[in-house]
Amino acid sequence: MTNARQAGQGPADLILTGICKSFGGHTVLKDLSLCFPAGEISCVMAPSGAGKTTLLRILMGLETADAGEIRGMEGQRVGAVFQEDRLLPWATAAGNIRLVSPALTKEEIRGAFLASGLSGSEEQPVSELSGGMARRVALLRALLAENDVLLLDEPFKGLDEETRRMVIDCLLHLRAGRTAIVVTHDEKEAGALGARIFTLPLLQEEGGQV
């Protein structure tokens, strides 16, 4: 099994300095400074509402920080897995992957499906897949695309323990040295990934309300 990713500008540390973000007067991120090392897997962990998904969306360019600076994303191609799978339901599993990676061979796709426990479902419509199967297709779409940075929001959500181990092994194989930032609530997942862990604080509003 191979990965069709081509080299971009090369890995760079992703450095966040003084990042702030609020929604409707509610502060989600406040003066956040982090350094995600180039070529490594980093896991972002925090309670619900602490801004993990917001942080990824800022890195993706889907949200704009109210203040602060991000360095290292310039010229980097980003692959993402959202909390929603965002697959085309009328297309096949392999068809969803070919939309972003048209140069992949049938053998490469077949190998990736085999490694993630999806063998035989390549030409199955996404609308017929279980939630766990669709989750794996969404992850493979990001892993098999030509990108430099992987931003993965709860990529193993809905998978049983045995399947999760298989998919983690698949991710480690297909990552091919790319920088990966993974949002997870599970310390076991972070350990299996060999990840550096970053914990976000849960900010308290005045009066002790979250």
Image: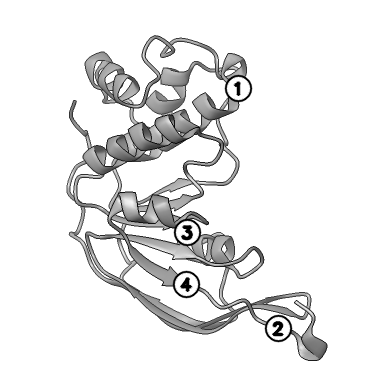
Q: In the rendered image, which residue does mark 3 sit on? A: 60
Q: Earlier in the sequence, mark 4 or mark 2?
A: 4
User: In the rendered structure, which disc, 4 or 3, sits on the residue that comes first in sequence?
Assistant: 3
Could you tell me if the residues under marks 3 and 1 are in contact, i.e. CB atoms within 8 Å?
Answer: no
Residue to which mark 1 is pinned: 89
Instruction: Please tell me whether residue 155 is drawn above or below residue 209 in the rendered image.
Output: above
For residue 17, above or below residue 73: below
Q: How is the image coloured?
A: one colour
Q: Which label was assigned to residue 40? A: none
Pick the front one: 137 or 12? 137
Query: Which residue type carries mark 3?
Result: Met
The answer to whether marks 2 and 1 mark residues whose Cβ atoms lie closer than 8 Å is: no
Determine the secondary structure under disc 4. Answer: strand
Q: Quadrant of the image for the C terminus?
A: bottom right
Q: Image check: 53 left or right of 118? A: right
Amino acid at pointer 2: Gln
- Residue 204 is tagged as 2
